[in-house]
Amino acid sequence: MRHADLELAERCQRGDAGAFEELYRLHAGRLYRLMLRMAGSVQDAEDLLQDVFLQAHRKLGSFRGDSSLGTWLYRLGMNHCLDYVRGRQARMGRATDSLDADAAPEPAAPAPAMPAAISRIDLERAIAQLPDGCKAAFLLHDVEGFEHQEVAAILGVSIGTSKSQVHRARLKLRGMLTACPELGRGATHAS
Amino acid sequence: MSCQAFEVLIGDAGDGGLDAAARQRLDAHLAVCPACRQMAEDFAVIRLTAGALDRPVPSPQVWTRIAAEIDGGSARGSDPVSRPVSGGLTLLPRAWPQFVAAAAGVVLATGIAWMAWRDPGSAAHPNPPAIVARPDSDVDVDPDQELKLAEDHYVSAISGLEEITRTSSEALDPETAGVLQANLTVIDQAIGESRAALQQEPASEQAQASLFEALRDKVALLQDAVALINEMRTGNAAGAARIVSGLNQ
């Protein structure tokens, strides 16, 4: 673990308010974007972000430095976010998918070509329709730029599962952006 | 190897995780398999667009509430931002007053940029004129109107800044002007997309946030352009280089 992480964690544990604010400034933006795209609303994302940082503040004493402080925080955040989203879906009677199991590969559909450029809003809409498991992996890897090793650590899965979930997400997005008239074909330009 | 086996390599190749031998095998397959080649191209478009998605930030009130909770306060109950809203307001972003406040700040900044352009020595004017008042969040206002007002502020600021850059663009070298124009085109596309999305779904928080982010980006870019023109006019090569470096990012 990096020395800076350990030092920041220790300062937070000692009750240094400035250190905890530094932790927030470092990671709140990325966590918020992940939560916004997972939960789908500004209000839910801000509430989840608040919950996660309050949880982190309570649990910092249990941080042992097995991973980086950032990974620990993102793992806490994604677990909380996935619990929330799945709880909401369960209440609505919708089935959810699993992160832990390697998903069966999607058939390589010989679909017509996707548009050469897609708009960000079309992609946002398509991402919103992804199953939670592959959505989380896709957001972490393709949107936020984490490596598969980091995605695996954050989601508590193997690197192979991270790769297969991202691949599954890309296949589904490709299918949606190709097949749905509102997604992809309506796009006229990239942004 | 089957096409399905190459799918994994296509993903790995895009993520930069292929060794030279695997890359060679994949390239050889892509050369003869249009379906896999199409998939590789589609994945590249998805990855590229995904990496360029909006990067919204949480409202400052989130940290305020966290800090209050940590300090033992009861901010959650007392902060009007965290109270559940009712009726038609539920579909509006909770950050809408910030859009308006940010727009007000943008107009003020535009005024300062304009003054700096007219008279480079006045950029640090201690008391710039109050061009627009910050909205009072305690006053009962119609959020739809306020959002429209915020957008109007941005559009007005953009219009003023565009006027400055148009009339002074000869101060920029062709390459810098090209970069500026390319960036503006991308932002204009984003603004157009957001407006189109808002027309379809006027209450979409995502589209509202996306529109305001794109408008903010455009104002920031034009402000950089005005600052660059000012640096060129005053002969500050170092300052100009610093701004050009930002434009290229």
Image (cartoon, rainbow, N blue to C red):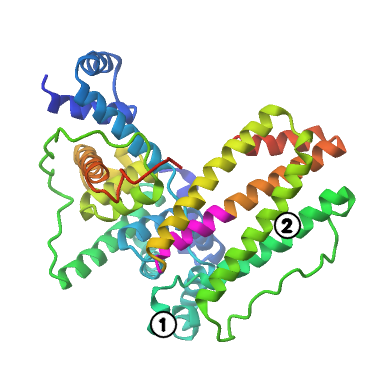
> In which quadrant of the rendered image does the N terminus of chain B lie?
top left
B206 drawn magenta: yes
Question: Horizontal and vertical percent for residue A88?
Answer: 22, 69
Q: Which residues are magenta?
A: B203-215
Q: Is residue B46 left or right of residue B176?
A: left
> In which quadrant of the rendered image does the C terminus of chain B lie?
top right
Q: Amino acid at mark 1?
A: Val
Quarter-of-image position of residue B109: bottom right
Q: Which residue is mark 2?
A: B110
Which of B143 and B227 lies nearest the eye of the viewer?
B143
Regarding mark 1 in the picture, which secondary structure is present there?
A: loop
Q: Is residue B102 left or right of residue A41?
A: right
Q: Provide the major secondary structure of the magenta segment.
A: helix
Q: Chain of mark 1?
A: B
Q: Which residue is mark 1?
A: B85
Quarter-of-image position of residue B5: top left
Cβ–Cβ below 8 Å for labels 2 and 1? no
Pointer 2: residues within 10 angstroms few (<14), some, or many (20+)?
many
Q: Does any portion of residue A145 appear in the rendered image?
A: no
Question: Horizontal and vertical percent for residue B127?
Answer: 84, 66
Which of B109 and A55 lies nearest the eye of the viewer?
B109
Q: Residue at x 44, y 85 (%)?
A: B77
Q: Looking at the picture, do discs 2 and 1 lie on one chain?
A: yes
Regarding mark 2 in the picture, which secondary structure is present there?
A: helix
